[in-house]
Amino acid sequence: MTGLKNKRWFERECRSLLQSASLNSSYIYAALLDMDKLSQFNFKYGIEAGNEALILTAKKLSKAVEGEYKLYKSGVDSFLIISTYPNRNLCDLELQQPIIDSKILALANFSHKINDLEVILSASLGSTIIDASKDSYDSLFNKLDYSLKQAKKLSPFGYYFADLDALKRYERTNKIRYLLINVDKSNELKLALQPQYINENTFHSSEALLRWHSQELGIISPAEFIPIAEESVAIIKIGDWVIDNVCKLLHQVSQLGKSTCIAVNISAKQIVASDFKEKLLASMQKWQVLPQHLIIELTETTLVSDIELVKETMVELNQMGFRFSIDDFGTGYSSLSYLKELPISELKIDKYFVDGIMDNEDSSSKTIVNMIIDMANALGVNSVAEGVEEAAQFNYLKQRGCDLFQGYLFSKPLPVEQWVEVLK
Ligand code: C2E
Ligand code: CA
Ligand code: CA
């Protein structure tokens, strides 16, 4: 219809371009342009008008890119653009890239006349520069796909250029996603336990924090891998691993004649899973742990994500003796009336607010911290300050009535053996 070569042609020509480019370590520019909401356009103006608009767009794009770049049609309403010749000079290509990107996304390419009416169809563009010596056709296509997805988040006329740093991050994320599939069986996961104190010398309880020492990538922070795990069932497997190992640890310390309480972080996906309760109870039974020794930490955002379902599980587990702590309190948007209905026994003040309480110029953190402590009092639950690093922060929180303290001032998260010593 547009007279352009299709995706199969793109693949054939792109593969041979990559091959010749890899021989002399050259770089290639590639881009994927996708029309935004063409179906809505078709619905409003008719398929004929939609086809006409695509043909016109193709013509204008061909003109915009001709010479240095080639244009192909991909799927129903996408276009592929790629360097005609490989370029040995990366800097040179990096200078050209924003120019060609803006030429492609120029408004004029997407404005059409329909019955004398000026109509603008929009599109989103993801582009990248490929090092031909390192990339295959498939990885090029995956990168384009990734760039376009990022661009679509900003649509209409979304735009995203994946530079080398972005591509490195993307590749690392992919690698982590892949390694997460079997991480629970890998022996690479460990628990760290961070003690929580009533005051300088009085140990109270602990929070279990996950540690991953990957053979391939080294130490990976949970702040990096948990959000990636949360995109798939990996978070369930990891979550099960944490629960089982915390129960096992509680069992071990009980054999040493010690009794303590550990808080575990539970993700939204995990708590709403239909078999969450069964698996939790199975681990508890296997290691002969009582519900009083576990605190389930849910973030405020988790509460909001599926409040009715989460509430049902919380109420049921609470009746069995489990307690709940609301993590990162003050960063989500939970409604106060709901808080009253949920079986909560603890509010955790986020490190972000604790960091801000000694700020003399901006008192907003202090105000929020005061409010959380007062609210915990009013609800009859504990307040726990997280990330306490300085004595001044502790002193303020203590005199303001905060109940528990967790942070480097008291202790960093500890490996299991060291933590057992503290407990003893
Ligand atoms: P979080 O639950 O808010 O955990 C507190 C984080 O603050 C931990 O980081 C802890 O090491 C750190 N921290 C504690 N005190 C201090 C301090 O005084 N200064 C500083 N700079 N940091 C402090 P970590 O262990 O890297 O965990 C990051 C996040 O990863 C956690 O935030 C939690 O959201 C998630 N996470 C960790 N373990 C698990 C887990 O087993 N399951 C799930 N679902 N999420 C987990
Ligand atoms: Ca937590
Ligand atoms: Ca937190």
Image (tube, helix red, strand yellow):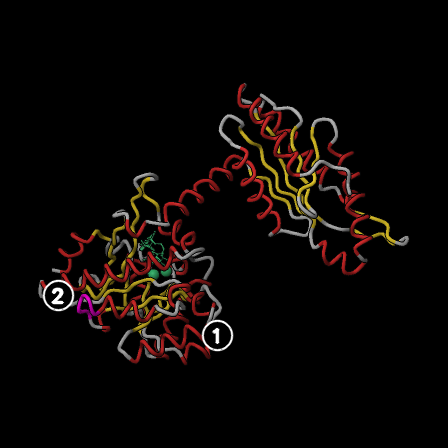
Tell me which segment is drawn in magenta.
285-289
**Within-10-Å neighbours for mark 2: few <14, some 14–19, many 20+:** some
Residue at 57%, 44% (x, y): give it.
Answer: 145
Q: Tell which residue pokes out farthest to the top in this image.
A: 24
Mark 1 or mark 2, which has the lower sequence index? 2
Identify the amino acid type marked 2.
Ser
Image quarter hosting the N terminus: top right
Q: Is residue 122 magenta?
A: no
The picture quadrant for ligand 2 comes to bottom left
Identify the amino acid type marked 1.
Ser
Q: Tell which residue pokes out farthest to the right in this image.
A: 116
Residue 157 appears anywhere in the view: yes
**Within-10-Å neighbours for mark 1: few <14, some 14–19, many 20+:** few
In the figure, residue 61 lies in which quadrant?
top right
**What mark, if any, has residue 254 been given in the picture?**
2
- Viewer-proximal residue among 245 and 17: 17
Q: Residue 85: image x %, image y %?
A: 65, 24
Q: Residue 33: image x %, image y %?
A: 67, 43
In the figure, residue 160 lies in which quadrant?
top right
In the figure, residue 256 lies in which quadrant?
bottom left
Residue at 24%, 73% (x, y): give it.
Answer: 291
Q: Give the residue pinned by disc 1.
A: 335
